[in-house]
């Protein structure tokens, strides 16, 4: 063992009190440890002041305790009053809306679909393809009003007056048969029996059997016809001097087909008919008389 390590071992044993009497006597004669002996003798006289453990722990807790955030108390009474008012309003509206609409009847048709429906007074409505009609049966006796979008034929019982409401005007009837169409941005009404009053944009026209009217772009145009029922209620649609674009728009109500008319033929007049149950025949019925060449591929009409 080196002299340095031996000295460290002896000093460690000295400090821990493990030296024998002989080793202590030998160590006391060494001059190189004189300074260390004076330090150890001085340290042996040191003493710690008395400590109050409980008090010290209390002060430590006071210093380390996190400051509690200020608590704000919010009164819920105003919010509860508002909530109660909203709930009451919602309840009143629900009761009113349910009472008003509990008898609401909605009629709708899809592509190439036509339905018949008996009205409360025994009258009958025939709803055309891609159309909708609604009325309230619970107050029918007081308010015989029908909202219509699309086309419908009405067979009205005598003495049963009611009004058909459309986006373009109202049709008032009393015991009659009539046809109403709101298609292609126009209101068209044909009277087949009795009389019909058509009111739109502060204009009023009364129709007799065989008379019709077209309301479009703010003006009325009266027409005459000789058929006894609307053609569309059967298996075909019939036209006389009708713009081709309007005919094609009607065609799309019966067939899932894409047709984009060129602008130079869109305004051509068409007189004729097309069937509701055969697309190829319908296209031939429309385009052949006008000598318009086309091809049909995957549900799309392409013009040559």
Image: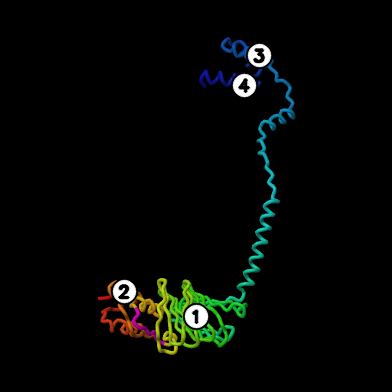
Which residue is denoted by mark 4 in the rendering?
Answer: 13
- Mark 4 is surrounded, within 10 Å at the Cα level, by few (under 14), some (14 to 19) or many (20 or more) other residues, namely few
- Tell me which segment is drawn in magenta: 235-242
Binning the other alpha carbons within 10 Å of mark 2 as few (below 14), some (14 to 19) or many (20 upward) gives: some
Determine if residue 194 is in view. yes
Residue wearing tag 3: 42
Query: Which badge, 2 or 4, comes first in the chain's sequence?
Result: 4
Could you say whether the residue bearing mark 1 is in a helix, strand or loop?
strand
- 240 drawn magenta: yes
Please tell me how crowded label 3 is: few (under 14), some (14-19), or many (20+) other residues with Cα within 10 Å. Answer: few
Residue under label 1, please give it.
Answer: 197
- Per the image, label 3 sits on a secondary structure element best described as helix
Q: CA distance from mark 3 to mark 2?
A: 116 Å
Judged by depth in the image, the label closer to the viewer, 2 or 1, is 1
Cβ atoms at labels 3 and 1 below 8 Å apart = no
Q: Nearer the viewer, residue 78 or 63?
A: 78
Q: Is residue 33 left or right of residue 299?
A: right
Residue where numbered disc 2 is placed: 261
User: Which callout, 4 or 3, points at the residue further toward the start of the chain?
Assistant: 4
Say which residue appears at 27% left-offset and 75% top-offset. Answer: 303
Q: Position of residue 75 (x, y in %)?
A: 70, 48
The numbered mark, 3 or 2, whose residue comes first in the sequence reads 3
Query: Residue sitting at 36 percent across and 79 percent down?
Result: 247
Which of the 4 image quarters holds residue 144?
bottom right
């Amino acid at each position: 063992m080196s002299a340095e390590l031996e000295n460290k071992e002896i000093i460690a044993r000295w400090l821990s009190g493990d030296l024998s009497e002989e080793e202590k006597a030998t160590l006391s004669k060494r001059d190189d440890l004189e300074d260390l002996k004076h330090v150890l003798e001085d340290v042996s006289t040191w003493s710690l002041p008395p400590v109050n453990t409980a008090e010290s722990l209390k002060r430590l807790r006071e210093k380390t305790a996190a400051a509690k955030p200020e608590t704000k108390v919010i009164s819920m009474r105003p919010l509860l009053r508002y909530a109660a008012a909203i709930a009451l309003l919602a309840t009143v509206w629900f009761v009113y809306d349910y009472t008003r609409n509990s008898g609401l009847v909605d009629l709708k048709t899809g592509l190439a679909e036509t339905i018949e429906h008996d009205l409360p007074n025994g009258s009958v409505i025939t709803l055309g393809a891609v159309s909708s009609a609604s009325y309230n049966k619970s107050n029918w006796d007081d308010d015989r009003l029908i909202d219509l979008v699309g086309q419908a034929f009405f067979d009205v019982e005598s003495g049963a007056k009611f009004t058909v409401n459309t986006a373009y005007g109202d049709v008032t009837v009393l015991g009659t048969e009539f046809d109403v169409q709101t298609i292609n941005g126009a209101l068209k009404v044909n009277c087949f029996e009795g009389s019909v009053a058509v009111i739109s944009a502060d204009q009023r026209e009364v129709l007799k059997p065989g008379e019709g009217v077209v309301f479009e772009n703010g003006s009325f145009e009266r027409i005459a016809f000789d058929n006894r029922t609307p053609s569309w209620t059967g298996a075909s649609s019939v036209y006389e001097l009708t713009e081709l674009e309007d005919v094609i728009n009607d065609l799309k109500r019966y067939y899932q087909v894409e047709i984009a008319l060129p602008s130079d033929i869109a305004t051509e007049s068409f007189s004729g008919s097309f069937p509701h149950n055969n697309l190829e025949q319908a296209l031939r019925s429309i385009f052949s008389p006008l000598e318009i060449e086309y091809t049909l591929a995957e549900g799309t009409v392409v013009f040559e």
